[in-house]
Image (cartoon, grey):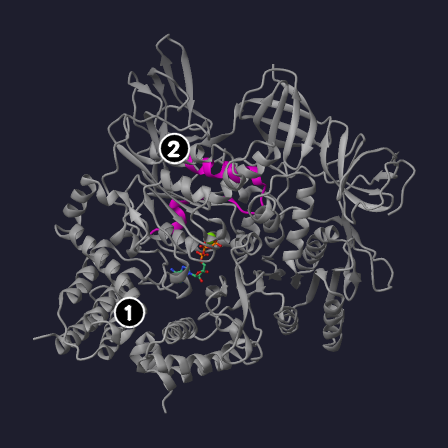
Amino acid sequence: MATNGKVTGIIANLVIVEADGPVSQNEICFIRHKGVDLMAEVIKILGNKAYTQVFESTRGLKVGSDAVFMNHMLEVTLGPGILSRNYDGLQNDLDKMKGVFLKRGEYTDPLNPEAEWVFTAIAKQGDKVEAGSWLGEVIEGWMPHKIMVPFKFEGFYTVKSIVKNGTYKTKDVIAVVTDSKGKDFEVTMTQKWPVKVPIRAYKEKPRPFKIMETGVRTMDTLNPLAEGGTGFIPGPFGCGKTVLQHAVSQQAEADMIIVTACGERANEVVEIFTEFPELDDPRTGRKLMERTTIICNTSNMPVAAREASVYTGMTIAEYYRSMGLKVLLLADSTSRWAQALREMSNRMEELPGPDAFPMDLPAIISNFYSRAGFVYLNNGQTGSITFLGTVSPAGGNLKEPVTESTKKAARCFYALNQERADSKRYPAIDPIDSYSKYLEYPEIQEYLKNTIGADWVDNVTLAKDILLRGKEVSEQINILGDDGVPIDYHEKYWKAEVIDFVVLQQDAFDSIDKSTPFERQKFMLEQVLDIYKTDFDFKSFEEVNPFFKSIINTFKQMNYAEFKSEKFNGYLEQIKNKINERKAV
Amino acid sequence: METTAFQKIYTKITQITKATCSLKAEGVGYEEIATVNGRLAQVVKIQGDNVTLQIFSGTEGIPTNAEVVFMGKAPTINVSDELAGRFFNAYGDPIDGGPAVEGKEVEIGGPSVNPVRRKQPSELIPTGIAGIDLNNTLVTGQKIPFFADPDQPFNQVMAMVALRAKADKIILGGMGLSNDDYLFFKNIFENAGALDRIISFINTTENPPVERLLIPDMALTTAEYFAHEKHQKVLVLLTDMTLYADALSIVSNRMDQIPSKDSMPGSLYSDLAKIYEKAVQFPEGGSITIIAVTTLSGGDITHAIPDNTGYITEGQLFLRRDTDIGKVIIDPFRSLSRLKQLVIGKQTREDHPQVMNAAIRLFADAANAKTKLENGFDLNDYDERTLKYAKEYSRELLAIDINVEIDAMLDTGWGLFAKYFNKSEIGIKDALVAKYWPKN
Ligand SMILES: Nc1ncnc2c1ncn2[C@@H]1O[C@H](COP(=O)(O)OP(=O)(O)OP(=O)(O)O)[C@@H](O)[C@H]1O
Ligand SMILES: [Mg+2]
């Protein structure tokens, strides 16, 4: 029998429920208020008192209200029909909700029970299967969506029967499997999974060894993100975290993108709703929305559901990864999730850690990041979740708990720099402070050499050195003055500026410049390095600045032109001529 | 608010702090309002039969035998067209001597708009101020604060923007407004003949600070009525949100909550976001645009209040005195309108984005040159030119006393480029340079 309870205390969305039976940590319960059931999650238990965080406003709620415990944790529903949907943090389909304003207690089906799917069997009678084994597939939009043995199934099973290829609904039984004791289990196209538990239906998780192309030059060229890797973008407000994530979501080389808007602005999600159905996926020509699912818990939506939203996103990502897909998960902003934890821990009067965040924040963050990764599935196929989160440090100061905890968990660090943003050097990723640990992996270096070019890694290292030297000499020039340093310093400074302006800076709002494939990145890096390697003949420092400005200007025109088009080549020619005029003999 | 026959009256208060009192009571709903000896209060905590009330006007003089009456509802306001032209206090009671407003009673601080039911903001709000229109273009449905030190003329600029914005309704939410500023708003709206479009909710420095907490919700619930039900373009002015946040910290302090940065409550982000996210563009044409003021202390934007605000709003307008020209300007470096890209170059001339960026970049070069100069170095020819350019740019385009059309701003920009620079120094697409570079 289900455990019931009565409300005995209310402090904002922390509601204390006295239970009449067993209750488990993270169990879901529904609190009845004026005929509406409000969903809540148990976050602490003291004796027979369950402390729950309600995923809704608690306005008007009274002590004595009834509660029912559901005997399961917060779960998502997995099955065909998730692609291209807009969900809230608890996986309610936002489009199915009636009315302009959100109504509390309105929970909608994430899938469409009436939709018919054309099923093709993959497994056959007698096959030995386990959690995550592919039984068949349906075509979801354009994507082969695998119907799997539910992840909750433990051990091995034998396929007893499987339906004939044909049209089925998500709740129809498509197979019966038998466990080792001879017990039969029916499998439908839908299954449920608790969001806070990682799905582990894979054989192994190797170190990432491939690069995920994002089209953003300062990432791909200088500090690439690995497929199955993790990265984060910390930065003060307004420095470009969201624009950068949106750019990545549009251009990245992934089968599926899950965008989690976690406690940020509604208008930013509306931008995706509005633009993604229109924008083309640069690789497939399909609309971007056809590969995107949005999980949206904006800052004005209930705080507890904000925390759930990142887990909902991750679980859906794990589901698609198990189908052998390349999934990119984005979360903006993970700081809001940490703040949701802080608000709750505060209300529970827990002993606070630094900046009043809960003590276990670092562990929570690293557990979450560890769910990403490249995997070999049990059937030998591969799948991956690449995770890129943003962090919004208080006061823009990176020495704060969320940034520091994330830095320990994520392998790529894309620090946005206020000064760069102020001077409109977008994307404002600091080329010197940022890093990608993947560049140090021998398997990644090998991959880069094989796929981009034998000298690529050396070129990247050189470019980084030039940038660093550029920064050093610019400090020198600032201290000693333009004529207090050798002309050579000016040349070094400007050679670094060429890399900055031509490679690092990228116009996210220009149709051509916004996305640069690796081939073009390679070409451009070679061009700017050629300039670096050229000795120039300057009589005075005053000649240096105009020369490089003009070179940069032409390069920028090149960035706006179609790769290797007549225009593009024309600009290249102009640059060559300018260089020849100035070259030292 | 009158007591009705069924309401139980409690007269035994068990605990009193500076902002709250507690008592034993039954059948009370969370966030329900009550009166304590006639003062408005709201339920902030229920534990068993122990109820804690936050008293908006403070607890000075509240006796332990005060009469506590629960109202069975959250704070409400009566909405109807009659609100237009009226002035109210934080509780929504008239302060202009007029009668109480009849209308539909709605709870303030209601639910959020379903994100999929929003429309992308797309309508430019022209203000004539180039620091805004050219560099930080505003759009209906946007939320944006002025960041300004207390001595900047932010209320004046805000009033000017409001009057030029062509809104159907302007709703002023004044929090901790000095009486002089209150009268300033009243006069300027009156003189502009705009009073019938204005609705004001005012908490002045003479009123208790905690009352301010009701102002944004009063203003925004009213705004929702006009924007959603009447499809009107509503502009909400909130000044000063720093004083609002201060009131939040007073309450959370009194409730023994663990403060986070700058003694602000840990929920500051969510609290502010709930207000600012009421800005919306509805598909049927109505919209709520929020222009707020966040005063800074010594220009420090890393303080928790401006910092959290910046993370919530869609940009900020930073006022600064430019000593070179002796005028207040909209600082192009720290200011930002994040929705500008939805309209610039689309509803404005094609060269708008590039002119804007190039002009600011050159202004940044001037700032570098200035640093050089201050460090005692010689300037080169380019530096000299940027300095001259910067002064003129500041005077002709950044100063808040500019009032011109956007095309004229762009032409002024090109004029300055041509006057001080050559084509390759401005880094603008060739096609645009060919078309707009001044011919003579
Ligand atoms: N790559 C870019 N190109 C051009 N403009 C940019 C770019 N990146 C950012 N911007 C400008 O900066 C603004 C703020 O960017 P964004 O919204 O991404 O900031 P953010 O770091 O996400 O801020 P917050 O933490 O407040 O959400 C944008 O609206 C845009 O005007
Ligand atoms: Mg953002």
Against A318, is A513 above or below? below
Against A202, is A305 above or below? below
Quarter-of-image position of residue A205: top left
In the image, the segment drawn in magenta is A286-315
The quarter of the picture showing ligand 1: bottom left
What residue appears at the point 57 percent right and 39 percent down from the top-left corner? A343
Marks 1 and 2, how far apart at CA: 55 Å
Compared across the picture, whether A368 is left or right of B171 comes to left
Q: Which of A204 and B320 is in front in this view?
A: B320
Q: Where is residue B307 in the image (x, y as percent from the top left)?
A: 53, 54
What residue appears at the point 46 percent right and 39 percent down from the top-left corner? A310
Amino acid type at circle 2 is Tyr
Amino acid type at circle 1 is Ile
Against A582, is A264 above or below? above
Residue A34 visible in the displayed image: no
Q: Residues within 10 Å of mark 2 (few under 14, many from 20)?
A: many
* 1 vs 2, front mark: 1
Q: In the current view of this chain or complex, which residue is farthest to the bottom? A: B440
Q: Answer whether residue A310 is magenta in the image.
A: yes
Instruction: Report the number of numbered marks.
Output: 2
Q: Answer whether residue A305 is magenta in the image.
A: yes
Mark 1, residue position: A477
In the rendered image, residues at marks 1 and 2 fall on the same chain: yes
Mark seen at residue A319: 2
Q: In the current view of this chain or complex, which residue is farthest to the left? A: A585
